[in-house]
Image (spheres, helix red, strand yellow):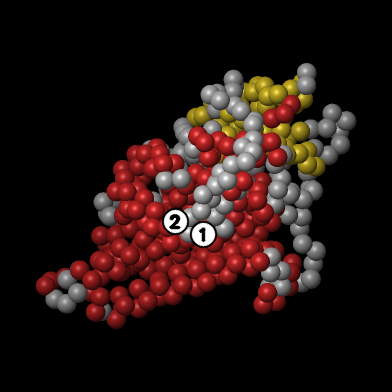
């Protein structure tokens, strides 16, 4: 396995417009949809989907042009996420974890230049994927301020890592694992948090296939076990004192939270598409189609309203972020981002619930995709920022209290 840290001096990425990205995403989403039920049922990882994403150039969609990427803006990335999720939410969510890293680094540089160049080179030349690996069973979201149990100890000019990580999305495919660990101060001072670049073939690294979830069953979010993993000193990517702000904070929130939101909208749109098609065709007892029933029309209209509202908030927040419109409409851009995420998740869950009612009792049948949408649409509730933290941020703004130090959305 090649582990180059060379740069790609002089390379320039190609250009693709939004329409081309949407066209490609729609084609791939159709193929993903054909495989989604089997992967969901088996909890298997969709390697073939990622092979097609790689062949179509998606692995470099957000990579800067200077490194040979397409450098797609935030709004384009969100539209792609939404479209891919209409085919398979699991594939879209897993892919998002890779694509958002390059976008957030463009907007909020945090990784050393040589490491970011390597991540870009791997994505462009090899189609390699990367993701941050931060969550632990006892820690929950690192954005909550807890300390990870995974510990890094400096020894003989190397680092030794021990710990277990959960929710390692894309674990079967990842090349670069960016692992969050705690560095204790031997003198009893404040601990530090650091991210280390780990490869799957580093001695002591093991993936345990533990992922067996209610929704998003094909993301391959297994446990990563690190047992005395010895890394050279240069594998450290970020380092900061506990409680201090994270350089990736605001940018990470924008690309992560809005990416989750767009993915969730895509899943809900798939449910609405299915419910509308069902309503146009369903004719109980050889009578009129159910699309003529007032109750059905009301539910479909309400679901559409919820998706329109969600898109309006998500894309407004995205445009505000790209303009750095800190006081547009009297609402700070970071508040618009967390509000969009919180409201979108609730809107989309309600929309899919309404679609289930349109389809009726048969919506519970495993052979119908709407049952999967019902489960998948809920997953984003547990991605940062979770609703309680979003509401707390909004409350601080209204009460004129100091904002918390920005934390990365791992």
Q: Nearer the viewer, residue 347 or 409?
A: 409
Position in image of residue 269 (x %, y %): 39, 63
Occupied quadrant, residue 162:
top right
Position in image of residue 264 (x %, y %): 47, 58
Q: Which residue appears farthest toward the top when viewing the image?
A: 156
Side of 78 where 234 appears, left or right: right
Position in image of residue 359 (x %, y %): 28, 65
Query: Residue at horizontal 63%, vertical 63%?
Result: 322
Occupied quadrant, residue 139:
top right
Occupied quadrant, residue 150:
top right
Q: Nearer the viewer, residue 89 or 70?
A: 70
Q: Which residue appears farthest toward the left when viewing the image?
A: 286
Q: Callout 2 environment at 10 Å: few (<14), some (14 to 19), or many (20+)?
A: many
Q: Which residue appears farthest toward the front when viewing the image?
A: 10
Callouts 1 and 2 close, C-beta under 8 Å: yes
Q: Which residue appears farthest toward the bottom when viewing the image?
A: 294
Q: Is residue 17 visible?
A: yes
Side of 35 where 7 appears, left or right: right
Side of 107 where 284 appears, left or right: left
Query: Residue at horizontal 45%, vertical 50%?
Result: 92
The first of marks 1 and 2 along the sequence is 2
Q: Is residue 392 above or below residue 331?
A: above
Query: Residue at horizontal 29%, vertical 48%?
Result: 34
Circle 1 sits on which residue? 76
Name the secondary structure under disc 1: helix
Position in image of residue 377 (x %, y %): 44, 57
Q: Nearer the viewer, residue 62 or 230?
A: 62
Q: Callout 1 environment at 10 Å: few (<14), some (14 to 19), or many (20+)?
A: some
Circle 2 sits on which residue? 21
């Amino acid at each position: 396995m090649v582990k180059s840290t060379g740069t790609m001096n002089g390379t320039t990425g190609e250009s693709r417009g939004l329409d081309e990205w949407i066209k490609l995403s729609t084609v791939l989403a159709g193929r993903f949809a054909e495989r989604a039920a089997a992967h969901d049922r088996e909890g298997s990882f969709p390697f073939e989907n990622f092979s097609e994403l790689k062949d179509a150039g998606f692995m470099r969609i957000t990579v800067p042009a200077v490194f040979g990427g397409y450098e797609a803006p935030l709004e384009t990335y969100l539209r792609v996420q939404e479209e891919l999720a209409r085919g398979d939410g699991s594939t879209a969510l897993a892919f998002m974890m890779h694509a958002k890293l390059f976008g957030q680094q463009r907007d909020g540089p945090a990784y050393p230049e040589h490491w970011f160049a390597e991540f870009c080179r791997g994505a462009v030349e090899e189609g390699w994927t990367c993701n941050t690996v931060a969550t632990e069973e006892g820690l929950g979201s690192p954005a909550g301020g807890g300390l990870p149990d995974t510990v890094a100890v400096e020894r003989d000019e190397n680092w030794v890592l021990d710990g277990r990580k959960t929710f390692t999305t894309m674990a079967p495919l990842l090349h670069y694992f960016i692992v969050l660990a705690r560095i204790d101060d031997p003198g009893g001072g404040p601990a530090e948090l650091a991210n280390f670049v780990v490869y799957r073939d580093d001695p002591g690294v093991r993936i345990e296939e533990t992922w067996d979830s209610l929704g998003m069953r094909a993301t391959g979010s297994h446990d990563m076990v690190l047992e005395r993993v010895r890394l050279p000193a240069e594998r450290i990517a970020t380092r900061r004192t506990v409680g201090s702000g994270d350089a990736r904070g605001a940018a990470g929130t924008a690309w992560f939270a809005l990416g989750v939101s767009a993915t969730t909208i895509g899943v809900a749109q798939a449910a609405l598409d299915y419910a509308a098609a069902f309503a146009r065709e369903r004719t109980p007892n050889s009578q009129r189609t159910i699309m003529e029933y007032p109750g059905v029309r009301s539910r479909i209209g309400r679901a559409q309203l919820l998706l329109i509202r969600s898109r309006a908030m998500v894309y407004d927040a995205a445009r505000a972020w790209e303009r750095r419109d800190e006081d547009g409409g009297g609402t700070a851009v970071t508040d618009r981002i967390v509000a969009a995420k919180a409201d979108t998740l609730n809107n989309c869950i309600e929309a899919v619930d309404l679609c289930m009612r349109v389809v009726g009792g048969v919506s519970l049948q495993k052979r119908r995709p709407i049952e999967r949408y019902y489960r998948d649409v809920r997953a984003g509730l547990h991605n940062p920022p979770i609703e309680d933290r979003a509401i707390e941020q909004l409350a601080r703004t209204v009460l004129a209290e100091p904002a918390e130090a920005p934390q990365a959305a791992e």
